[in-house]
Amino acid sequence: MPLDLGMYESNTDYKSEKQCQRTSFAFYQAVRDLLPVWILEDMRTMEVFHWEDDGRACAFSPSEALLYALVHDHQQYARYLLNRFSVRALEMPSRSFCCCQASTTPHLTIAIRYNRTHILKMIMDSVKDFTDNDKYLYINRQGCVHTDGSKTALHLACDLVRPECLILLLGHGACPYVTDGAGNTPLDCLLNQIGQSDFDTRTKHVCLGYLILFMPTFRFQMKRQLQDDAVLWKRLIGEQAFQWLSGQTPQSLFVKSMQKLIQSISNEQLDSLPDFLRPPDFRLH
């Protein structure tokens, strides 16, 4: 329920650090409980504040509210914020929400980390309002150096093996050749995941299939490692995929045809590709 502002003796008391913590937590709980959008917006615009490190009390911005909606998968609230505020809802939140102000992509990071594919699709739809250059820079920007190791959204999707997030990002312009702070491509991240364990092998191969669809050529750091340990990697990713990634044989005519097809269709059509054209049927083994 909305907060009773009469409980505070003065405006100064209301905006004290202690009271900001209380109102901030109340807003967090309200989003967590999936309260209706109108209640959340009444709270956000009139009744709740969060405390900044520099000693200021600040109202929640649409961007900060969207982070809460992502964490708790409040899809209706996320849709409202993105429709009402468009790209403003994707602006950088304050330092109390994100320590690395240079990353500018915390919403992508949270969407992928929590596997919020429905809200991620909403974000990708909103990004259409960016210029082509700004859209490319936004989707491919490196993340927080402290928490994400300067990985892009695509790196994170590969690290966490999120195939739905991966195809959404690739279909909306994420570059499969972009590198993180260590020089690794998303393919390097995925191969590291494949090499670490046999857990969820099928899903990892789905991700590998998606990457292959968007990589006309294979440029990645681990190519020499694959070549030096051929027996292991043939077992891990299959003979055919090994031949392609190691550079021993060119990609099949079918894969090249699929790459051309994907380049010629819209993002909406990409989301609805028939099952028999999707990567799980590439027969990587």
Image (spheres, grey):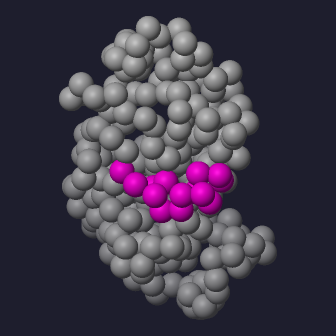
Residue at 53%, 73% in the rendered image: 128
Residue 45: percent from left, percent from top: 53, 38
Regarding residue 76, the answer to whether it shows in the image is yes
Q: Eyeballing the image, is 83 above or below 49?
A: below
Q: Is residue 27 above or below residue 241?
A: above
Task: Give the quadrant of residue 268.
Answer: bottom right
**Which sits in the foreground, 277 or 35?**
35
Task: Say which residue appears at 37% left-offset and 45% top-offset.
Answer: 93
Question: Magenta includes 270?
Answer: no
Residue beneath the point at 70% across and 46% down: 76
Q: Please give left or right for residue 271 compared with residue 190 in the image.
A: right
Could you tell me how many numbered marks the image carries? 0
Q: Nearer the viewer, residue 106 or 269?
A: 106
Residue 36: x %, y % from top left: 73, 36
Nearer the observer, 158 or 61: 61
The quadrant of the rendering that contains the N terminus is: top right
Closest to the observer: 177 or 130?
130
Q: Residue 100 in the image: x percent, y percent?
A: 26, 44
Quarter of the image containing the C terminus? bottom right
Do we see residue 169 in this rendering?
no
Range of residues picked out in magenta: 79-92
Q: As drawn, is 57 to the left or to the right of 182? A: right
- State the image coordinates of residue 120 (x, y, percent, origin top left): 58, 56
Left or right: where 8 falls relative to 116: left
- Magenta highlight on residue 82: yes
Residue at point 21%, 29% (across, down): 54
- The overriding secondary structure of the stretch rendered in magenta is helix
